Image (cartoon, coloured by chain):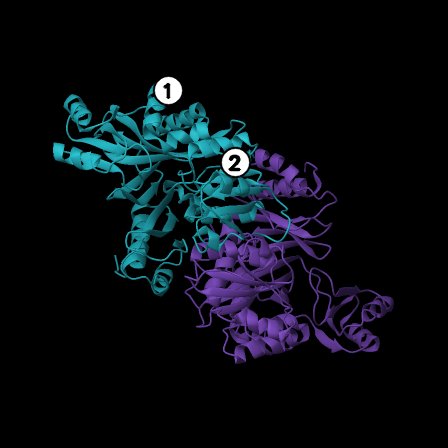
Chain colours: A cyan, B purple
Amino acid sequence: MNAYSPIGPVVGIVGAGQLARMTQQAAIALGVELRVLANAPGESAARVIVDTRIGDYRDLADLREFGKGCDAITFDHEHVPTEHIRALAAGGLQVHPGADALVHAQDKAVMRERLTAIGAPCPAWARVSDAAEAVAFAQEHGWPFVLKAIRGGYDGRGVWVCRTEADVTEAFAAGVPLMAEAFVPFERELAVLVARSPHGQGVSYPVVETVQQDGICVEVLAPAPGLDPEEAAQAQRVALNIAHELGVTGLLAVEMFQTAGGLVVNELAMRPHNSGHWTIEGARTSQFEQHLRAVLDLPLGSPSMTAPVVVMANLLGGDDPDLFKRYEHVMAHDPGVKVHFYGKEVRPGRKIGHVTVTGDDLDSCRARARHAAVHLTTGEYA
Amino acid sequence: MNAYSPIGPVVGIVGAGQLARMTQQAAIALGVELRVLANAPGESAARVIVDTRIGDYRDLADLREFGKGCDAITFDHEHVPTEHIRALAAGGLQVHPGADALVHAQDKAVMRERLTAIGAPCPAWARVSDAAEAVAFAQEHGWPFVLKAIRGGYDGRGVWVCRTEADVTEAFAAGVPLMAEAFVPFERELAVLVARSPHGQGVSYPVVETVQQDGICVEVLAPAPGLDPEEAAQAQRVALNIAHELGVTGLLAVEMFQTAGGLVVNELAMRPHNSGHWTIEGARTSQFEQHLRAVLDLPLGSPSMTAPVVVMANLLGGDDPDLFKRYEHVMAHDPGVKVHFYGKEVRPGRKIGHVTVTGDDLDSCRARARHAAVHLTTGEYA
């Protein structure tokens, strides 16, 4: 807790992961005073935000206490119960995104219902309450198909690509409510990040390509290489329209599949997003600054790029916990690569940081980003 | 004080002003854990650095306690007594810059002696112990001339341009040790920011022009417009040579006069410097990241520019304390301007922030920066 009066507006972020941590870089410049609700001291953002409160984001009393004196409340993750968000807003707090918008990022079935209603491109989908209904879905829409946990999945968790009835049985064994989606034979994955403010201003960042491994994003290419300008504009229109129709306030990341038949919306996130980390160096306004501007209902910043090509590569934890001893090689090898560490203990597969390279040439930017990411993660020379 | 173990290296900064505050933006990305020694809670950097200790930088015991567990110690200002810095280093702490270098930024007479010895271009100068010696200096080198406090001056304070003997009497009335310098009829002021690491690596940022009003820097133009490439290279050589000869570790800002007869060194600072704030958006490696890399003896980052032209304008406090109500106009008017607030209460004339504009055209960048700075300061539309 801070021992002084705020000078600038106070924004409370529920959750103290790397998104809140990186938001602090933007808050320092804007003169915005951040407060975070952490589970424990020493979490990623709690290391860099003075006004850290310890509490449980599932506990309404903790949330109410946390919100006192905040000019706006927002989120580092999407796990706060919808009814608590509603209660905070009813208590007079400015909560962005609001419950009616955020539920679409919390509940995949609600999201699909709404996107279908507004005409956003979706795969065939259905709520399924047991294996028999899932198999019936597959018989109609074809194998393989996808079962997804309606709530709580991320980074590939809570997603089952079902090729056989045994796969279906396995998915239901998880014991959580599921929905079915047709398997989309995509060419690549794209993401569009947009911001929308309470007074209704919207901006879209350039469409990016996201490269996944085992369901985890490993690389983002901005702008999406070779994307037809018409298709890029359509992707941005789809994302801005979703933000508008759902009443999103703050950031909205729309993950899409690019297919031979056009774009299909895959997932929504309503917060700064891994697919937007490249904006810290690569856009005039970082996604973190943009989110703060949006939730404070300030005019939005320019989303234009600072260089023709930007490549971001995630750092996933490897076997060796000592990141810092591999720092020197990366810094000496490439004085222009930007390294971002999240202040997290290394655990295998955990997102512990990212690197960003800006330049004119895609192949060279990718090679530079990959070299840095592989060396920092494994100590190998890629 | 933090309630968790550090994951990255710990850098202690003595002083909690805006330089330490902006260093936190770089530290967050590098995974460096900052600690600051503040005079009081609520100071600029104390608002954004969890591990804030309250103490007196003039007290060796406070400094020793502060330094415990730090991988390196550095400074937000140049007021720590030289003998304390020597004592900290003798106690085994890594202090950058070290006392033998820093004294040249603390004591202008020591600086002039050393610069003269290494052949760096200086005006005629002399130590003067009373008004008679000062007048004798003027009779030899001409009126007007300049008297400077040997220690402690900044932002135009501690500098007297003497045109008459009455001015000399007034300067000595301040009761501090003075030195005399010939008045330099300069065309404009330039600054060169270089970094040097303990293992001896050095880099130089592009030479910038600094525009002063009443002894305070109001605007920085990067690169210095129209500067002859040979003269720019010479300025960089002079600055790198000073860093090398003085054994500077960390950043060194060399303020210079450009005259018809060539360059003349005016002042030295050994820390991030107002003339380098443009590097946050305008250079691949910000001066704050560079300083951290240097004091941790990591390889230095690229100082290359991210755009052809970068203009920084300082925000000086005006009569109206409420900065934030003027935010909206500036953000709406120019979504590409970057605003940096220092988390300080507004006082007339106080440096409370700065704005940065990057682009291709000097005139338009200057106009945009000036519009934002004037409006944020005064509420007028420039």
The image quadrant of residue B182 is: bottom right
Three-letter code for the amino acid on which mark 1 is drawn? Ile
Q: Please tell me whether mark 2 sits on a helix, a strand or a loop.
A: helix
Three-letter code for the amino acid on which mark 2 is drawn? Val
Which residue carries the number 2 mark?
A295
Residue with the most extreme bottom position: B90
Foreground: A171 or B302?
A171
Mark sitting on residue B169: none
The chain that hosts pointer 2 is: A
**Up-down relation of residue B94 to residue A6 (above or below):** below
The answer to whether one can see residue A188 in this image is yes
Alpha carbon distance from label 1 to label 2: 24 Å
Foreground: B252 or B88?
B88
Q: Please tell me whether mark 1 sits on a helix, a strand or a loop.
A: helix
Which residue carries the number 1 mark?
A118
The answer to whether one can see residue B114 in this image is no
Residue B70 picture location, percent across and down = 49, 69
Residue positioned 32% across, 25% down in the render: A112
